[in-house]
Structures are given as C-alpha cells and as structure tokens.
Image (spheres, grey):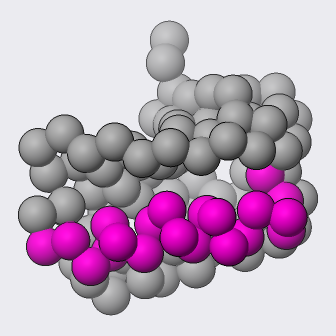
Amino acid sequence: MAISVQIHDNVARISMSGRFDFQVHREFKDAYTPLIDNAAVREIEVEMARVDYLDSSALGMLMLLNERAKGANKAVALLNTSGVVSQVLEVANFSRIFNIRNAG
C-alpha cells in the first residue's frame, strides 16, 4: 500500500494504492491525523481508484477517520471506488455514512 497526501486550498486528498488492510493502519492514521488538526482543511478526500482490496479493518479505519473528522467539523468523501472495493462499501452500506463520488 502506498499512501500520499496533497492539500489544495481547503481540501486534502489522501491517495492510496494496493491493499487497504490492517497492515497499513498506522500509515493511514499518520496520513490523516495532521489533516484533522489542520484548521485550514475543510474536507478530506480519500482517493481509492488504485485500491484493489479492502477488508473489515479498512472499513473500521474509514469509520474512525469519519468520526475524527466530524468532531473537527470536516467532511469526508470517498473518491473513485470500483470493483471489489465498491462492492464491499455497498454491502457495508457506507453510502449512508460517506459522500462517495465516482467519476463517470
């Protein structure tokens, strides 16, 4: 899993690729924690176009991100989910919790 962060204006984007599972929990938390604390950031986007797998621990990490962001009055959006990732998010009913924006 590769994780990178970019901030443009008041939107931060966490881009990920590969497997999103428990092995990357610390790296994912280290990516979003400074964004929660950054007063200039109003929205956190999680770019998932290159994520090819996620498990229940990844769902938990996304939920924790969402809770922390809400506590700081920030929005969270999941971007460009597809394939298995999209199916898992659908089964978990994440569209009721997150703004999921897919291209096309």
| Residue 75 left/right relative to 21 | left
**89, above or below 103, in the image:** below
**41, above or below 46, in the image:** below
Q: Which residue corresponds to the image point at 58% horizontal and 53% vertical from the top-left?
A: 95
x and y percentages locating residue 43 in the rendered image: 27, 56
Can residue 81 be seen?
Answer: no
Q: Nearer the viewer, residue 54 or 99?
A: 54
Does 30 appear in magenta?
Answer: yes
Bounds of the magenta segment = 20-39
| Residue 16 left/right relative to 78 | right
Q: Which residue corresponds to the image point at 53% horizontal and 70% vertical from the top-left?
A: 30
x and y percentages locating residue 57 in the rendered image: 83, 71
Prevailing secondary structure of the magenta residues: helix
Q: Nearer the viewer, residue 104 or 10?
A: 10
Residue at the far bottom: name it.
Answer: 71
Q: Which residue corresponds to the image point at 25% horizontal and 45% vertical from the top-left?
A: 7
Looking at the rendered image, the quarter that the N terminus falls into is: top right
